[in-house]
Image (cartoon, rainbow, N blue to C red):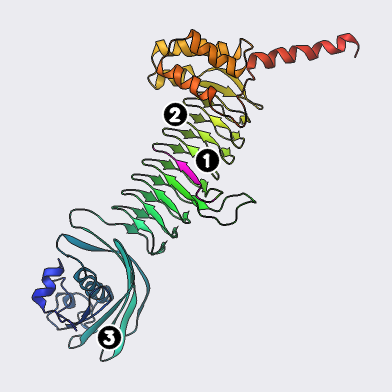
Amino acid sequence: MTELGIKEIMKILPHRYPFLLIDKVIELEEGKRAVAIKNVTMNEGFFQGHFPDHPIMPGVLILEAIAQTGVVMALRSMQSEGKIVYFAGIDKVRFRRPVMPGDQLRFEVEALWTKRNLGKMKGRALVDGEVAAEGEFMFSIVDKESSGAKIHPTATVHDSANLGKNVEIGSNTVIGPEVKIGDDTKVGANCLIAKWTTIGKNNNIHQGATIAAPPQDISYKGERGEVIIGDRNTIREYVTIHLPSGEGGQTVIGSDNFIMVHAHIPHNCKIGNHVVIGGYVGLAGHTEIDDQAIIGGMSGIHQFVRIGRLAMIGAQSKVVKDIPPFMLVDGNPSQVRSINSIGLQRRGISNEAIAEIRKAFKLIYESGNSTQKAAAEIKKRLRPLPEINHLVQFLEEESKRGINKKTAIEVEADELIFPEIPELGI
């Protein structure tokens, strides 16, 4: 059984007087268990101010000494140079008896689990065979020049989860199995990230969000799928993002998106980059939203609908067919009003391209062309700018719902017919 003296301990632990709280390691199984001792004397600095007339060792320092024993156990099993261990959480702590000058503390720690840079152990401190304190400790192992995950003590993190540097996990949040969270991502209080989820860097997930819950699909039988979320997304309160249906399926959200309160992103959806989804928006399964689109609050999107790049959907709209790129849509049922000219300008689309997009709008919506005929006419008559090529590609792709061809102009024409009926005596 391995023993370590104080000089060997100091090569592993960064702590120094007055915070080096173990004197010797008397038993060590690297990565599994360790036993250390500390001789408590009246010369300890903390006795000067902690009940000076009745000297008692502070309970938090007893826990710190247990943790230092665990650090030796953890770092001894790997190359400790350049590594440091941070507390990530403490559970089930109990203090059983006071520790006073003249006592010899025996610290016993045992690893419960370790997973890459995270681990959990249980430990106890004894005096003359009697337990003085005990508890369970979660820790993260990081490089000295970086920072570890910050996990609230009330949070639950599965041992198969992988948390990056500077990740923050809020109170009462649950991180399930096979979840990977990238560096600098913050997860607020009372969130659930159930399982099979990969989240990138610098995301901000607000309180109450639910990610990777089972899909609301009666055909789902528990098959494995993935939720994949990119970088720098803001996911506001109580957003729900569901696992996909079908073995090996994916629900995908890109990067730099802003998803507002209570929005629902169900199974098998694909969200691009720089998308804004308003509050209380309800998407249906298999919806696809391309880059830079904006979905107004309280809108509903039918399953399998595609929303093209830089399209804008007005608040409270009902969208049951595909919306081509660059269009402005509003209403229930939704109507294509015009091109999203302000959105195009804000995103830096050239005046030349905007002019061509206006011509394409007329060929799609004012000429009476079928979708296929409109695409052919656009290719034939308009300049092959990147935006025009992108629009044509969208029109030519397979569509399960068809292209929304209802315009505000057509609706107004329909409405003019009905006021004439009473005059006909009907």
- Residue 314 in the image: above or below residue 221: above
Q: Nearer the viewer, residue 23 or 175?
A: 175
SS of the residue under disc 2: loop
- Taking 170 as reference, is 53 left or right? left
CA distance separating discs 3 and 1: 55 Å
Q: Are marks 3 and 1 in contact (CB under 8 Å)?
A: no
- Mark number, residue 269: 1
The magenta region covers 247-255
Q: What amino acid is found at the position of numbered circle 3 in the picture?
A: Leu
Residue at 54% over, 23% down: 396
Residue at 61% over, 35% down: 300
SS of the residue under disc 1: loop
- Taking 235 as reference, is 201 left or right? left
- Quarter of the image with the C terminus is top right
Residue at 64% over, 11% down: 368
Note whether residue 334 is visible: yes
Residue 206 in picture, x, y percent from top left:
44, 47
Q: Are marks 1 and 2 in contact (CB under 8 Å)?
A: no
Residue 13 in picture, x, y percent from top left:
16, 68
SS of the residue under disc 3: strand
The mark that comes first in sequence, 2 or 3, is 3
Q: Nearer the viewer, residue 276 or 302?
A: 302
- Mark number, residue 126: 3
Residue 147: quarter of image? bottom left
Residue 160 in picture, x, y percent from top left:
39, 62
- Residue 31 in the image: above or below residue 280: below
Residue at 34% over, 76% down: 135
- Residue 325 in the image: above or below residue 385: below
